[in-house]
Image (spheres, rainbow, N blue to C red):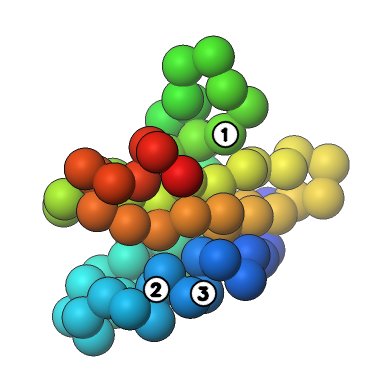
């Protein structure tokens, strides 16, 4: 079962600010995670969201089992992402 990728407006804005090589690494990792997102994503403590590590960058997402979707909420450097 392949999950759909859905990008929040904020995540798209954050992605567009990143260098092209970082954007492509993030997008490739997201594509790889579509078959089994729970293998790639790690649940955040005391939250319903998940994180995906790509070098020093993090992707915060909500994985929706019923809709078979990965809703990408935030993308950013690890030092800034958790304050979002």
- The answer to whether mark 2 and mark 3 are in CB contact below 8 A is yes
- Ranked by sequence position, the earlier of labels 3 and 1 is 3
The residue pinned by badge 1 equals 49
The label on residue 12 is 3
The image quadrant of residue 3 is bottom right
Find residue 11 and report its horizontal and vertical position in percent: 51, 65
Judged from the image, the secondary structure of the residue bearing numbered disc 2 is helix
Find residue 78 and report its horizontal and vertical position in percent: 24, 44
The reply, left or right, for residue 71 in relation to residue 22 is: right
Q: Residues within 10 Å of mark 1 (few under 14, many from 20)?
A: some
Q: CA distance from mark 1 to mark 2?
A: 19 Å
The image quadrant of residue 41 is top left
Q: Answer above or below: position of 30 versus 41.
A: below
Q: Answer above or below: position of 27 versus 66.
A: below
From this viewpoint, which residue is outermost toward the front?
83
The residue pinned by badge 2 equals 15
- Ranked by sequence position, the earlier of labels 1 and 2 is 2
Find residue 81 and report its horizontal and vertical position in percent: 35, 46
Q: CA distance from mark 2 to mark 3?
A: 5 Å
From this viewpoint, which residue is outermost toward the bottom?
20
In depth, the one of 46 and 67 nearer the eye is: 46
Residue beneath the point at 38% across and 37% down: 82
The image quadrant of residue 73 is bottom right
Residue beneath the point at 54% across and 14% down: 46
From this viewpoint, which residue is outermost toward the right?
66
């Amino acid at each position: 079962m392949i999950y759909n990728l859905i990008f929040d407006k904020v995540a798209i804005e954050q992605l567009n600010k990143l260098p092209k090589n970082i954007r492509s690494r993030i997008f490739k990792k997201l594509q790889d995670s579509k078959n089994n997102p729970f293998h790639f994503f790690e649940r955040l403590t005391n939250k319903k969201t998940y994180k995906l590590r790509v070098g020093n960058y993090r992707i915060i997402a909500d994985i929706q089992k019923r809709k078979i979707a990965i809703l990408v909420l935030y993308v950013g450097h690890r030092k800034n992402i958790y304050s979002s």
